[in-house]
């Protein structure tokens, strides 16, 4: 008798530096943000596609081969686990040694070579016997393996890998394929046959898209496992780990969350748990674990078919502070804190969540009449076993009280699509509903949208209200894996930040060339009404590497953080340490960022995950460097040198200086903004060939909130390839440009009838309005201007106008010289200064789209 596991939605150190000349290692502690990076040099991007085999046994040495692009002159490799060390043998082949005390799980591995540090790939550590697939010398060859082993294999195009094992009657054998969960492109399909070729079971997805088969062996004998890609694709990136054994495998827990720093009884559900509870490993650093069979399971699942799980109760203590997990985590799980729990001889830990508010278990609450009354704040741990089940809760509220509801399902690897409803006291009238979070801040590089609902609700009156939660997907058959967390709390602003390597559409490592820069994208996942400004700083940078603080203004979710290396900086590989400072009124709250990475490109829904740490290297040399300045003084013919004060309704001029480090690099350079706040429209500009300075300007809209913001400038150009008539495309980044936006004193707008063209030798009149605001009553003097100049602009001249008192309109005469350059003049504008006691203190502008024609 056997069954195939069904689909389940949701996928799922020590820091060292390597210095040349035997220098003392530098250490950068890890951080928790999401970042993207692109390198500003001729150093090729190192994209690690695979490490094969992708597994090794604790206490052993295994030969591995790295494959990918840009992996020239590899010298070493690194891992997020201090228990993994690498020694090069030849080319891209290394020996990996796994320390005997390394916990089983998955860890990040990167290569290090002349191009710096590569992107990451997952490497598995197991306690079981490790076997590498033997490529057959003849068709239809079946490789024999022992029970309780881990096989590392790879699928070539059209391959069907087959393995034979022997088992005894009554053995429950668990066959689990790891592919998507270890960064593989394989979309695996598993089949189990008896010795006569009869298919006993098939599965193509249980842990996300990774398949599992569990089978109670019907008779002594041999059995055959077949594994292939769903569409018979294959290649270096189609690697897998195949577990075949009778050991314990925990699938989920109830409750799935424990209050931070507290001890609780947790019921584990899985296979082969009975008799395996001894030697349970406590990795929390606090408390002990034990079997507590006197405590009944939350819900009886022993009779559920076809998913039959054993249950075992253990006592766990949630750590008081964060801990790294040897499990892969999706971008959507960014807000889910947890710790790993190893049960008995289990080779795979289970992640148990941690809550910072009290945790309660749901009980019989399947109707409004039996609604479970909960306090606020509370995290409820529940289970929606039946397909049509709905759990009911009741809260007491006062008029105007603000609540924040959030459910966790997909983000804790539960096969559910949850839906929350707020109803009146009788449970008859729906007052609010919360559904999927489709906001994908990370895009294709770090897809962060998910099916879990969250939302803000204001109580309309004093009284009791009903809260219901239900699952919208799956069959009507019972499935005990449908666990959830429901958080009910007041609106307490929170933010999670991540840094992910690679701004481009392809994965990339963070490599800073000497004399150049690399840009990292910091992403802010704002929760529960968090709209404050956020400052991010880098700590513990190695000598020769600098990084200015950046700001994510109110409600901004992305900003570029730029690393700069001196021309004589040492070659180094270390990890980034970023800290976010949240303006909390009287004090700033500091918190570490998390890391993320893009896995592969070309997927319509994107591909990325979280990492424990983000390596950074200094490697190669830059041929081009640009420096941006958003605070260049303006020269005014009436008021002299003006220090710019930015406000909504103004223009941010960014002066870009070019350092061409090679004499032959004289091509034109295209500029564009990077990491702009969503309300600021991007622009492009060109620095002509041979010139070393240019401008790019951005209009600050009237709706832009007051605050501090950061952006950067990207430059694209072409370099000649030595010895040929060809060129190569090069992209570089500027330093971060940080600017503060103050409340405006006035607003300048063009009249709708303002002319858009002017002929050479002609005079046109441009009407405009200048409306004062925020108590300003001083004089406004308006001129024609462009970046770096006022009044006389590229053979266009304007006659300035001053308005005083209540005057809110004016007209500027613009004169075009006979030799004025034809076409559109970039970033031409009307520029006003607000004067207080004969001093120009305030600034306001609006772009003037004016074309010079014959």
Image (tube, helix red, strand yellow):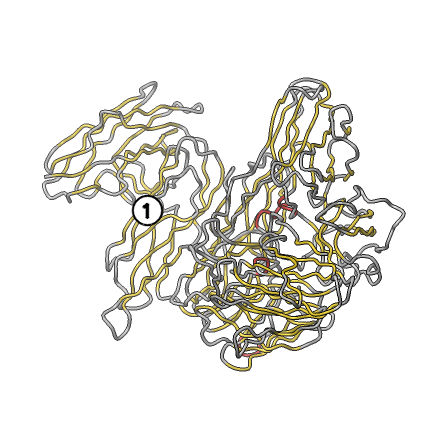
Above-or-below relation of 439 to 282:
above
In the image, residue 260 lies at what x, y percent?
Answer: 76, 46
Whole-percent x and y of residue 324? 67, 57
Residue 403 located left or right of residue 518: right
Q: Residue at x 47, y 68 (%)?
A: 68
Q: Most extreme residue toward the right, as rendered? A: 294
| Residue 131, horizontal then vertical, whole percent | 64, 74
Seen in the image, is 629 located left or right of residue 99? left
Q: Quadrant of residue 804?
A: top left
Q: Quadrant of the N terminus?
A: bottom right
229 to the left or right of 797: right
Which quadrant: the C terminus?
top left
Q: Which residue is mark 1?
A: 696
Residue closest to the eye, 666 or 333: 333
Residue 849: image x %, image y %? 24, 36
766 vs 294, nearest the viewer = 294
Quadrant position of residue 634: top left
Q: Secondary structure at mark 1?
A: strand
**Local crowd size for mark 1, using a 10 Å CA cut-off: few (<14), some (14–19), many (≥20):** many
For the residue pair 25 and 385, the one nearer the viewer reads as 385
């Amino acid at each position: 008798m056997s069954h195939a596991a069904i689909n389940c939605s949701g996928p799922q150190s020590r820091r060292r530096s390597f210095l040349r000349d035997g220098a003392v290692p530098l250490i950068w502690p890890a951080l928790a943000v999401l970042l993207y990076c692109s390198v500003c040099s001729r150093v090729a991007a190192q994209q690690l596609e695979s490490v094969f085999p992708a597994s090794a046994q604790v206490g052993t040495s295994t030969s591995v081969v790295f494959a990918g692009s840009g992996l020239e002159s590899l010298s070493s490799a690194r891992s997020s686990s201090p228990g993994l060390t690498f020694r090069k043998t030849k080319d891209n082949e290394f020996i990996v040694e796994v320390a005997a005390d390394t916990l089983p799980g998955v860890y990040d591995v990167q290569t290090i070579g002349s191009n710096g540090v590569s992107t990451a790939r997952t490497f598995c550590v197991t306690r079981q016997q490790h076997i590498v697939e033997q490529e057959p010398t003849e068709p239809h060859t079946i490789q024999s393996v022992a029970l309780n082993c881990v096989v590392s294999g790879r699928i070539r195009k059209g391959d069907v890998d087959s393995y034979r094992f022997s088992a005894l009657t009554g053995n429950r054998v668990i066959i689990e394929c790891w592919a998507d969960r270890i960064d593989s492109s394989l979309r695996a399909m598993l089949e189990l046959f008896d010795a006569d070729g009869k298919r006993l079971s098939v599965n193509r997805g249980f842990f996300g898209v990774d398949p599992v088969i569990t089978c109670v062996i019907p008779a002594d004998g041999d059995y055959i496992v077949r594994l292939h890609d769903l569409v018979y694709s294959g290649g270096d990136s189609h690697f897998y780990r195949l577990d075949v054994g009778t050991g314990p495998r925990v699938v989920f827990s109830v409750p799935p969350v424990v209050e931070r720093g507290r001890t609780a009884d947790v019921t584990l559900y899985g296979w082969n748990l009975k008799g395996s509870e001894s030697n349970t490993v406590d990795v929390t650093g606090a408390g002990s674990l034990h079997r507590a069979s006197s405590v009944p399971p939350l819900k009886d699942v022993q009779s559920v078919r076809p998913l039959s799980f054993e249950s075992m109760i253990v006592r766990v203590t949630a750590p008081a502070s964060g801990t790294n997990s040897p499990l892969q985590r999706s971008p959507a799980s960014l807000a889910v804190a947890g710790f790993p729990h190893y049960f008995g001889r289990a080779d795979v830990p289970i992640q148990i969540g941690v809550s910072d508010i009290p945790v309660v278990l749901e009980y019989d609450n399947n109707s409004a009449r039996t609604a479970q009354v909960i306090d606020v704040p509370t995290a409820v741990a529940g289970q929606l076993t039946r397909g049509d089940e709905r759990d009911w809760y009741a809260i007491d509220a006062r008029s105007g009280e603000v609540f924040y509801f959030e459910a966790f399902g997909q983000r804790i690897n539960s096969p559910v699509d949850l839906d929350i409803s707020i109803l009146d006291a009788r449970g008859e009238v729906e007052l609010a509903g919360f559904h999927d979070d489709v906001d994908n801040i990370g895009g294709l590089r770090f897809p962060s949208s998910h099916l879990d609902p969250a939302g803000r609700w204001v109580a309309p009156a004093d009284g009791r209200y009903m809260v219901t939660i239900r699952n919208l997907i799956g069959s009507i058959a019972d499935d005990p894996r449908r666990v959830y967390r429901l958080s009910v709390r007041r609106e307490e602003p929170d933010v999670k930040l991540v840094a992910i390597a690679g701004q481009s559409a392809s994965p990339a490592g963070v490599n800073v060339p000497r004399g150049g820069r690399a840009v990292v994208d910091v992403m802010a996942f704002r929760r529960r009404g968090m709209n404050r400004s956020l400052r991010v700083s880098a700590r513990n940078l190695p000598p020769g590497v600098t990084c200015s603080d950046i700001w994510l203004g109110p409600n901004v979710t992305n900003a570029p953080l730029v690393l700069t290396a001196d021309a004589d900086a040492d070659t180094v590989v270390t990890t980034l340490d970023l800290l976010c400072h949240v303006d909390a009124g009287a004090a700033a709250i500091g918190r570490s960022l998390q890391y993320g990475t893009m896995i592969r490109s070309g997927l319509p829904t994107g591909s990325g995950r979280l990492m424990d740490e983000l390596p950074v290297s200094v490697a190669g040399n830059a041929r081009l460097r640009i420096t941006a300045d958003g605070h260049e003084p303006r020269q005014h013919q009436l008021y002299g040198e003006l220090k710019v004060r930015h406000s909504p309704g103004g223009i941010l001029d960014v002066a870009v200086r070019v350092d061409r480090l090679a004499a032959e690099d004289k091509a034109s350079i295209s500029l564009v903004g990077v990491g702009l706040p969503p309300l600021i429209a991007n622009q492009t500009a060109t620095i002509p060939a041979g010139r070393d300075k240019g401008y790019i300007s951005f209009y600050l809209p009237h709706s832009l909130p007051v605050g501090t913001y950061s952006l950067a400038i990207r430059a694209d150009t072409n370099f000649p390839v030595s010895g040929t008539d060809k060129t190569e495309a090069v992209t570089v980044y500027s330093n971060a440009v940080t600017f503060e936006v103050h409340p405006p004193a006035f607003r300048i707008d063009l009249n709708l009838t303002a002319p858009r063209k002017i002929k050479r030798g002609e005079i046109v009149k441009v009407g405009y309005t200048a409306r004062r605001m925020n108590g300003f009553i001083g004089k406004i003097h308006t001129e024609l201007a462009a970046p770096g100049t006022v009044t006389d602009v590229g053979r266009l001249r304007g006659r300035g106008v001053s308005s005083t008192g209540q005057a809110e309109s004016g007209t500027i005469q613009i004169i075009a010289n006979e030799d004025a350059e034809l076409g559109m003049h970039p970033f031409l504008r009307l520029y006003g200064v607000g004067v207080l006691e004969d001093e120009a203190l305030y600034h306001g502008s609006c772009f003037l789209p004016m074309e010079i024609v014959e």
